[in-house]
Image: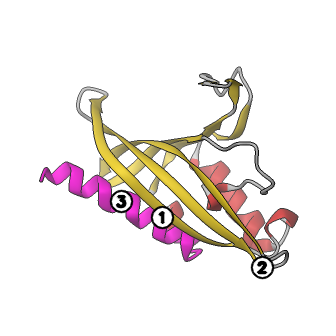
Amino acid sequence: MNAEFFDASALLSKEAYALDTQDWDGWLALFIPNSEFWVPAWKSEHEPTSNPRRELSLIYYSSRGGLEDRVWRVRSGRSVASKPMPRTQHAITNVMLAAVVDAGDALRVLSNFTVHQFRTKTRETEVLYGRYEHDLVREAGELKIRRKKIILLNDYMPAMLDYYCL
């Protein structure tokens, strides 16, 4: 098996585990400072938006700083939607290396995901699912996330939507 594929799969698993265990520092450490985190909205039944700066997004952060701010709000209790925090379980499947981008400096990795979440306050279970597109770069010998795009396939849901449930 290709070492790049193994390293990319391991990074995706590490990210899922950090989200499920609410290891926010570990999760943020997987992103480079100028990373992008994007959940496009849908233009039509089968076409998501294509430009986060000109079209509607469900979530968009142009750098890790936006993610850090969101984590701070969750930790501080200022995120009403996140109180209490749901229990989550991320499952990532069909991981594949799609391309080498930026003259070989980055890998594009495609995968599918399912996230089960249990909201203790309401005792409700919800399932979110879709596709991930990660662009990964090496920093000091380790793969890091430069860009994470999340195509949420069931975007009509009763759930509150935040980074930890995607």
Q: Nearer the viewer, mark 1 or mark 3?
A: 1
Examine the rendered structure and indicate whether residue 54 appears above or below residue 79.
Answer: above
Amino acid at dot 1 = Ala
Residue annotated with mark 2: 120
For mark 1, give the secondary structure: helix
> Label 3 amino acid?
Leu
Q: Residues within 10 Å of mark 1 (few under 14, many from 20)?
A: many
Q: Quadrant of residue 25?
A: bottom right
Q: Dot 1 corresponds to which residue?
A: 16
Under circle 3, the secondary element is helix
Q: Nearer the viewer, residue 134 or 96?
A: 96
Q: Which residue is mark 3?
A: 11
Q: Is residue 74 above or below residue 104?
A: below
| SS at mark 2 in the image | loop
Q: Split into 4 quadrants, where in the image is the C terminus?
A: bottom right
Three-letter amino acid code of the residue under disc 2: Thr
Q: What are the residue bounds of the magenta stretch?
A: 1-26
Q: Is residue 34 magenta?
A: no
- Dividing the picture into quarters, in which one does residue 75 lie? bottom right
Image coordinates of residue 49 in percent, x first then y, are 64, 24
- Per the model, the C-alpha gap separating discs 1 and 2 is 20 Å
Q: Is residue 108 visible to us here?
A: yes
Towards the viewer: 116 or 74:
116
Quarter of image, res 14 = bottom left
Q: CA distance from mark 2 to mark 3?
A: 29 Å
- Mark 2 neighbour class, 10 Å CA radius: few under 14, some 14 to 19, many 20 or more: few
Q: Are marks 1 and 2 in contact (CB under 8 Å)?
A: no
Whole-percent x and y of residue 5?
A: 22, 50
Q: Nearer the viewer, residue 152 or 65?
A: 152
Mark 1 or mark 2: which is in front? 2
Residue 58 placement (x, y as % from top left)? 72, 40
